Structures are given as C-alpha cells and as structure tokens.
Image (cartoon, grey):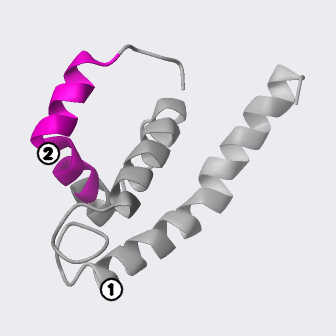
Amino acid sequence: EEDETKKKELANKFFADELPAHLQHLEVLGKLYGNGGAFFVGNQLTWADLYLFEMTNNLLQANGNCLDKHAWLKQNRAEVEKQPKIAEYLRNRPQTPF
C-alpha cells in the first residue's frame, strides 16, 4: 500500500483484529509441545524458537505492545535471548530496519 494513511489503518487493523488470535494459537502450541517449559519443543532450543524470536522481533519493531497479553511467548523470547551465543550476537549485531 502506497497511501500512508491507508497503510497505517491496515497495520492497526492487523495488530488489533488479526494478530492476537495467531499469537494465542502459537502460545497454546508452545505450551502443549513444550511440556510446560519455555521452549516450543521439549526443554531445549530448536529452530521453532529461533523462528518465533525473529518473527516477534519484527512484530515488536512495528508495535512494541503486541506481546503484552502473551506471557508464554514473552518468556520464550527471554529464554532465547539468554542463550550465550545468541546473547553475544544480539549485543554485537549490526542494527537493521528489519
């Protein structure tokens, strides 16, 4: 969308009406397959956790409050960020818009 007003309206609609249901589904799946832990599958980091981290990172850049009602997803992000090599990378990586 090239019209900035329309683009903002569409983004607001997405974050208010569409995204919450998808995040809720991800949270349910994470709790189910993560056996009560903070990771998506079992008790260790997997590609699913890395994918979710990057996806939610992009979402949070656009709307910093989008995970406020999703405690498990926030916990998952925190666990990913605590991994030593990931933490080091996040501290030193170049900043990019996406």
| Residue 90 drawn in magenta | yes
The answer to whether residue 77 shows anywhere in this view is yes
Residue 10 x, y percent position in the rendering: 77, 41
For residue 83, which numbered disc appears in the image? 2
**Magenta part mainly helix, strand or loop?**
helix
- The residue sitting at 56% across, 67% down in the picture is 22
The answer to whether residue 67 shows anywhere in this view is no
Quick one: 75 or 55, which is closer to the camera? 55
Quadrant assignment for the N terminus: top right
**91 to 21, vertically: above or below:** above
For residue 96, which numbered disc appears in the image? none
Q: Secondary structure at mark 1?
A: helix
Q: Amino acid at mark 1?
A: Leu
Residue 55 x, y percent position in the rendering: 49, 47
Residue 19 x, y percent position in the rendering: 59, 58
- The residue sitting at 30% across, 62% down in the picture is 46
For residue 32, which numbered disc appears in the image? 1
The residue mark sitting in front, 1 or 2, is 2
What are the residue bounds of the magenta stretch?
Answer: 76-93
Q: Secondary structure at mark 2?
A: loop
| Residue 87 drawn in magenta | yes
In the image, is 89 to the left or to the right of 9? left
**22 to 2, vertically: above or below:** below
Residue 51 x, y percent position in the rendering: 44, 53
How crowded pointer 2 is (Cα within 10 Å; few <14, some 14-19, many 20+) is rated as few
In the image, is 84 to the left or to the right of 72? left
- The residue sitting at 77% across, 37% down in the picture is 9
Closer to the N terminus: mark 1 or mark 2?
Answer: 1
Quadrant assignment for the C terminus: top right
